[in-house]
Amino acid sequence: MQRACQPWVDVDRYIADQLLGDAPVPAHGGLPPHDVSPPQGALLELLARLMGARSILEIGTLAGYSTLWLARALPPGGRLVTLEADPRHAEVARANLAGAAEVIVGPALETLPTLTGPFDLVFIDADKRSNAEYLRWALRLSRPGTLIVADNVVRDGRLVDRGDEDPAIAAQRRFHEMLASEPRVEATTIQTVGGKGYDGFSIALVTD
Ligand code: SAH
Ligand code: DHB
Ligand code: MG
């Protein structure tokens, strides 16, 4: 990813200072800085609350930053499951989450078949090349009314560079083609700039 432009960084900091004084502050344990930005984390919490979500699935935990935002939306007795391939990431996340989510370790395409749905919200944020497969699993674990959110689908605009054959980029085009051809979802994609650069996320409502 290109570096973020300074105004994007400054505005993200302004938003966090003005509105997100109670943002989670997990220990990072030296893991890569690939978590959602604070404003995006707050959006995840708001979306989950708008959905009245009682069960949430996350694919891609890292240190549990987005997980902590999602956990805030859950009512007592709610269920939050997060899937992480890297055991070191899962260990850092478990310490940060302190029981707020169930962390399941293993490649998500191996652990997804062990889950029982439906989930009210699914957040896809793991290895980018698998986003289309994760969308298929999200649909399988959905009910009408489930919201599916997928991070990192724009990637500096590389989404629309058809000559870019990086599997992590080509996968975002397949992901969009699947959204377009799937009659069960209404979806859009929002481009984002901020402290993490230029990217975007998709949101899809499962309609039936
Ligand atoms: N959702 C996190 C960021 C996740 S970064 C947040 O916003 O705070 C992406 C994570 O996906 C990394 O921790 C990486 O180890 C994990 N990952 C990569 N491949 C995976 C796979 N096949 N299955 C599950 N997790 C995977
Ligand atoms: C990166 C960013 C992310 O939000 C993520 O989930 C994984 C990787 C990145 O910038 O490489
Ligand atoms: Mg991400």
Image: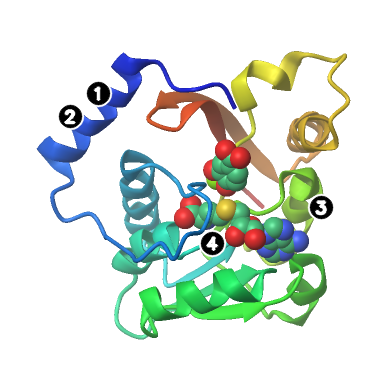
Which amino acid, mark 3? Glu
- Horizontally, is 129 left or right of 52 in the view? right
- Horizontally, is 21 left or right of 196 in the view? left
Quick one: label 2 or label 3, which is nearer the N terminus? Answer: 2
Please report the residue visible at 40 percent of the width from the left and 80 percent of the height from the top: 95
Would you name the residue on which mark 2 appears?
14
Q: Residues within 10 Å of mark 2 (few under 14, many from 20)?
A: few
Looking at the rendering, which quadrant does residue 59 occupy?
A: bottom right
Would you name the residue on which mark 4 appears?
62
Q: Residues under labels 4 and 1: Cα distance?
A: 25 Å
User: Circles 2 and 1: CB distance less than 8 Å?
Assistant: yes
Among all residues in the image, which is located at the extreme front? Answer: 30
Label 4 beta carbon less than 8 Å to ligand 1: yes
Ligand 1 quadrant assignment: bottom right
Would you name the residue on which mark 3 appears?
133
Percent from the top left, x then y, of residue 153?
64, 33
Frontmost residue, 80 versus 63: 63
Mark 3 falls on what kind of element?
Answer: helix
- Horizontally, is 68 left or right of 189 in the view? left
Mark 4 falls on what kind of element?
Answer: loop
Q: Residues within 10 Å of mark 1 (few under 14, many from 20)?
A: some
Which amino acid, mark 2? Tyr
Which amino acid, mark 4? Leu
Which amino acid, mark 1? Val
User: Circles 4 and 3: CB distance less than 8 Å?
Assistant: no
Q: Quadrant of the N terminus?
A: top right
Would you name the residue on which mark 1 appears?
11
Foreground label between 4 and 3: 4
